[in-house]
Image: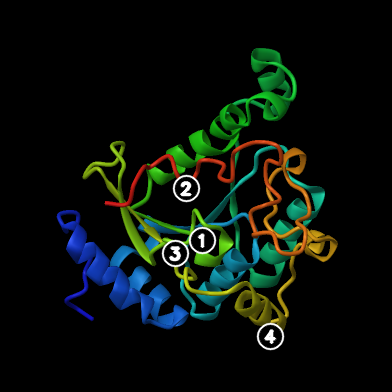
Amino acid sequence: MTRFVPRPDMNSEEVRSLSAFLEEMPLAELLRWNWEHFGARAAIGTSFQGAGLVILHQAVQLGLPIPSFTLDTGLLFPETLRLKKQIEGQLGIHIESLHPELTVEQQAAEMGPALWRRRPDSCCTVRKVMPLQKKLAQLDVWITGLRRQHSDVRSATQVLERYKFDVLQDGIIYKLNPLATWTRDRVRAYLKEHQLPYNPLKDQGYVSIGCQPCTRPINEGESDRAGRWTGFDKSECGIHTFLGDNI
């Protein structure tokens, strides 16, 4: 494993080779590898979807004090906020909440009311992307719960991805997607086996749960992300796209 050490000067082929190597690792080994090489310069970003809960739980089980954070847009479901407290209590961890500079009320005063109904991309940028950018400026690795099964857009997700991020000294940030290959059923089975709480909205047909005004239950046969931004040609909030293409 020692030859599989991430370096800022890796070329694209080396990154792909390292990602393929990591994809064969069990989740526990992958998280240990991450801690060995990055320590607290890597952090788990979670919106309390099932995959993120799996990663948080596994890190705690392994005794790895990997920092974690979430984006609190001011528009989350009450159920999501209650779940955050449950997870923190059950796992004995603190999950940092990242807030936008503008409150919902300040945003309405400056950009008009209910911006999410008129310009959802702008709303996501203010309430999600900008706070995330500030956090990532402190990190080398962003650990996510992205899964290939989520949507067509995410079907090419690699376990390890590398992006240009000019605010960092070396201009590179890694994204680690430990559960890229996991299915929805596998995530559910893990949550059940370890008796982890989940968002009760899941029982009402919500699968991918974001901000309250922009999320609906999905219908049978729809992709996991179909319940987001109904009526718009949009399936991503921007936090997983603002960095551009994987290099």
Residue type pointed to by label 3: Asn
Disc 2 secondary structure class: loop
Numbered tag placed on residue 193 in the rendering: 4
Q: Please identify, in this view, whether the residue under mark 4 or under mark 1 is nearer the observer.
A: 1
- Residue at position x 38%, y 81% from top? 25
The residues bearing labels 3 and 1 have C-alpha atoms spaced at a distance of 6 Å
Numbered tag placed on residue 177 in the rendering: 3
Color theme of the render: rainbow
Q: Dot 3, crowdedness within 10 Å: few (<14), some or many (≥20)?
A: many
Residue type pointed to by label 2: His
Quadrant assignment, res 33: bottom left
Numbered tag placed on residue 100 in the rendering: none
Numbered tag placed on residue 146 in the rendering: 1
* Image vertical order of residue 38 relative to residue 63, above or below: above
Quadrant assignment, res 135: top left
Q: Earlier in the sequence, mark 3 or mark 4?
A: 3
The residues bearing labels 4 and 1 have C-alpha atoms spaced at a distance of 21 Å
Which of the pair 65/49 is nearer the observer?
49
Disc 4 secondary structure class: helix
Q: Earlier in the sequence, mark 3 or mark 1?
A: 1
Disc 1 secondary structure class: loop
Observer able to see residue 57: yes
Residue at numbered disc 2: 240
